[in-house]
Amino acid sequence: MSLPESNKPPKMLVDYSGTWDIVSNVNSEAYMVALGIDFATRKIASMLKPQKVIKQDGDCFIIRTFTTFRNYESSFKIGEEVKEVTKGLDNRTVQSVVNWKNDKLVCVQKGEKKNRGWTHWIQGDELHLELTCEDQVCKQIYKRTL
């Protein structure tokens, strides 16, 4: 007897591993305001060109974001809720869970801020990232370099 399609565990559809350099960053200022990030930090952040290095092993991920100002690391396993301190951003503690939605990685972050999270997906040689907080969405695009 096989499981109904809706009850089967998700399979890895895409490999996110690689090094990615930012090429587009839309609405980051309003997103940072929604997070409550101070003026000086927002001005510094707006000049940065982040690089993401993603290591994927099945449903386990390590995402490192590097800038000349701050670095940030997030590690998670699909479907497992983790306590996370957003040190590279607004220094809040959130409960994060990442799941597959088709070939997209969708993270829901529960904490002080409403409607907070992010979605990653790959289109061609581009890594797309939508960051959401309250009513603001920041859209970033990265190009694979390695």
Image (spheres, helix red, strand yellow):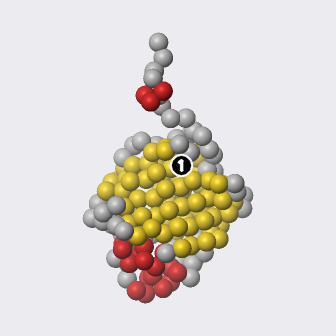
Horizontal and vertical percent position of residue 115? 34, 61
Task: Give the residue at the far top of this rendering.
Answer: 1
- Asked which quadrant contains residue 99, the reply is top left
Residue on which the image places disc 1: 104
Q: Residue at x 39, y 49 (%)?
A: 97
Q: Examine the rendering and report whether any part of residue 30 can be seen.
A: yes
Query: Camera-side residue: 79 or 82?
Result: 79
Answer left or right for 125 relative to 101.
right
Quadrant in which the C terminus is drawn? bottom right
Which residue is painted at 65% across and 54% down in the image?
Answer: 123
Q: Nearer the viewer, residue 93 or 141?
A: 141
Q: What amino acid is labelled 1 in the image?
A: Lys
Number of numbered markers: 1
Single out the residue that lies furthest toward the right: 146
Q: Secondary structure at mark 1?
A: strand
Residue 64 visible? The answer is no
User: In this picture, is 120 found above or below 87?
Assistant: above
Residue 114 position, x and y percent, is 30, 63
- Label 1, residues with CA under 10 Å away: few <14, some 14-19, many ≥20: some
| Lateral position of residue 33 relative to residue 122, left or right | left
User: Could you tell me which residue is drawn at 53 percent across and 42 percent down?
Assistant: 102
| Residue at figure coordinates x 43%, y 53% from the top left | 107
Vertically, is 3 above or below 9?
A: above
Residue 90's place in the image compared with 94, above or below, is below
Position of residue 76 measured from the top left corner of the image (x, y, whole percent): 46, 48
The percent position of residue 2, horizontal first and vertical second, equals 48, 17
